[in-house]
Amino acid sequence: MILRDMTEADLDAVAVIEREVHPHPWTRGNFSDALASGYQCKIAGSAQQMLGYAVMLLGPDEAELLDIAIAAAHQRQGWGRKLLGEMLGLARRHQMRRVVLEVRVSNTAAIGLYRQLGFADIGLRRDYYAAENGREDAILMGCML
Ligand SMILES: CC(C)(COP(=O)(O)OP(=O)(O)OC[C@H]1O[C@@H](n2cnc3c(N)ncnc32)[C@H](O)[C@@H]1OP(=O)(O)O)[C@@H](O)C(=O)NCCC(=O)NCCS
């Protein structure tokens, strides 16, 4: 897997994947803002194509993973695990102490991935996300580096 910086030229393709895999997707503008804000925005690819991407915010000593996705056709082949591993390595190289994230309680695929890579539950945010029928809780997870 090749990891490279996301650029504006990637955003149409990123937005297509995002709409494909997320029930409540980020917009192209959200990714553009993330780039402009200097967040760590990475594209995961093979030599042939874009497999997925991740966006992470580096704070003074703690990083927050804001988005991670693998295109539907490439899911369940270990790419998410590889990409998250690369993002944790990136945070470590920036001397981050911990990586935190929020995830929908219903997102069993992502929760399984995070647990596999060493994330543990550190809190629950009630009614954090908009959902089909009202609101949905978020689990706050953290991984010490
Ligand atoms: C979460 C996501 C990135 C995982 O990527 P992936 O490449 O399919 O995951 P991997 O193949 O590396 O799987 C790693 C582990 O995640 C868990 N997992 C992944 N997909 C799963 C699924 N459909 N159901 C249950 N567990 C799943 C498993 O624990 C898996 O390990 P295993 O294969 O040994 O059982 C992918 O499902 C995705 O893009 N989802 C939509 C976007 C999203 O929800 N992002 C996270 C919130 S921002």
Image: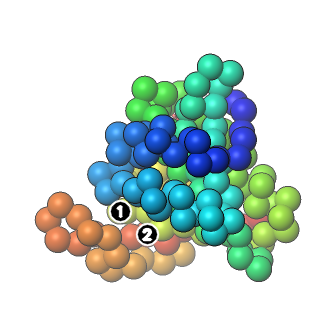
Residue nearest the viewer, comparing 4 with 100? 4
Residue 114 at x, y percent in the picture: 55, 54
Q: Image quarter for residue 35? A: bottom right
Dot 2 surroundings within 10 Å: few (below 14), some, or many (20 or more)?
Answer: many
Residue 141 visible to the viewer? yes
Q: Residue furthest left?
A: 133
CB-based contact (under 8 Å), mark 1 and mark 2: yes
Q: Residue furthest front?
A: 9
Q: Which residue is mark 1?
A: 105
Say which element carries label 1: loop
Q: Is residue 10 above or below residue 98?
A: above
Residue 8 at x, y percent in the picture: 59, 48
* Residue depicted at 34% across the width and 76% down the height: 128
Say which element carries label 2: strand
Amino acid at dot 1: Val
Q: Earlier in the sequence, mark 1 or mark 2?
A: 1
Inter-mark Cα distance, 1 to 2: 6 Å
Residue 60 at x, y percent in the picture: 77, 79
Dot 1 surroundings within 10 Å: few (below 14), some, or many (20 or more)?
Answer: some
Q: Which residue is mark 2?
A: 139
Amino acid at dot 2: Ile
* Residue depicted at 49% across the width and 72% down the height: 140
Residue nearest the viewer, comparing 64 with 29? 29
* Residue depicted at 77% across the width and 55% down the height: 90
Q: Is residue 54 above or below residue 71?
A: below
Residue 118 visible to the viewer? no
